[in-house]
Amino acid sequence: MHAEPHTGQPESVAARPLAELLDCPPETAKLLNHSAESVSCEAGQIVFAQDAECKGLYVVVSGQLVRRSERMGAHLTLGPVRAGELVELAAALGGVHHSYTLRAVTPTTLLLLPKPALAQAFDSYPPLRMQLLEELAREVSRAYTASTVERKMPLRRNPGEAHSA
Amino acid sequence: MAGFQSHHAPEDCINCEHRHLRMFCNLTPEALVDYDKIGMLMNHARGAKLFTEGDQARSVFVICEGQVKISATSREGKTMILKIAGPGDVMGLSAVLANVSHEVTAEAIEPCQVKTIRKQEFVDFLGRHGIASMHAAQSLSGEYLTVFHDAKRLALSGSAAGRLARLLLDWGSAAAPGKPETRFTMALTHEEIANMAGTSRETVTRLLNQFRRDQLIAIKGASMTIVKPDALERMTA
């Protein structure tokens, strides 16, 4: 069991990085700001768990987190996530469930943009959708690279800890 | 690899009777008319390379008919099969949108019909139609999950039997989604299957024979039927 992270409406200053990152016009930024939730986590807290339903797109405002995937008691560390990064764009735009667990390494603040608001902004503002598509494409590209690296590593036959870049 | 039903190749997108079954092409009437005007339908023979790893990404490819092997090459020169793409799959999308070279090679493993759309033409099309952008996002998301789960299967699965069972189940569900009996055509060699399952050709041959003896699967020529999906599923757990 893990403690639930605290969620609530963000202050306008906390919501700003999302709008700046996505470079939206006022009406779209307003939609994003109004719907975004602030998520605060202590070190060790789980933001979302693998296979849990994806609620939306996360943006890391501050702190550091780590992505971990697990199967049959074996764990694979997928690497750190830092401030400014978008998290789980693939699940937010196309998937249903999280493909990994996101855990805070340090005290962390994130913004959660719920799926319905993301879909509305995606639909109403073409430049935003192209930016998100480009970011998602880069995420896929990084996954290809990681996959190639993973295949160069010896397979683990026993449950334990495996690390990838 | 998924074994897809054999269809007559469509002559255009508007009159394509299989469009509603395919994720990307299932567009609104307005977007479909626009989609039909862009790109060109091209036929490719078995073995033809649509694009090669490291090539500049100039076009997006949507498979109308046939199957395409997606592979990457390691630094040691070993070819690694990442997936088998089928009708409705979009290839080259991540490289085009990320503005990078192709990360993979796409090679037809049977005669294929593919709609080829130039980069700018495709990007402009996405800009005009939100539904096409959403389908592109879903396609990218699916591509991401495929690569992610593939890497995870190899890194974390405990046994070669489990990895092979997972592959067969994935191919079966892609060939006949929602149907009780899953039958598909095996277009890959045991060597290629071994590559995808992260094991040796000899192990694949031995395991397939074992699965057949245990009546988990039935093999007739190039056709494979999954007889006991639950038993295979338990192997992957």
Image (cartoon, coloured by chain):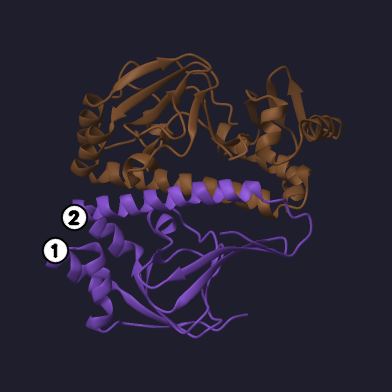
Q: Colour of chain B?
A: brown
Quadrant in the rendering for residue B110: top right
Query: Which residue lies under the disc numbered 2?
Result: A125
Residue A52: percent from left, percent from top: 53, 65
**Residue A75: image tag:** none
The colour of chain A is purple
Q: Residue at x 79, y 31 (%)?
A: B208
Q: Amino acid at mark 1?
A: Pro
Q: Residue at x 55, y 69 (%)?
A: A49
- Say which of B228 and A158 sits in front: A158
Disc 1 to disc 2: CB gap under 8 Å: yes
The quadrant where residue B39 appears? top left
Q: Which residue is mark 1?
A: A25
Give coordinates of residue B159: x percent, y percent.
78, 48
Mark 2: which amino acid?
Tyr
Secondary structure found at label 2: loop
Q: Residue A30, image x and y in percent?
A: 18, 71
Tag 2 subunit: A
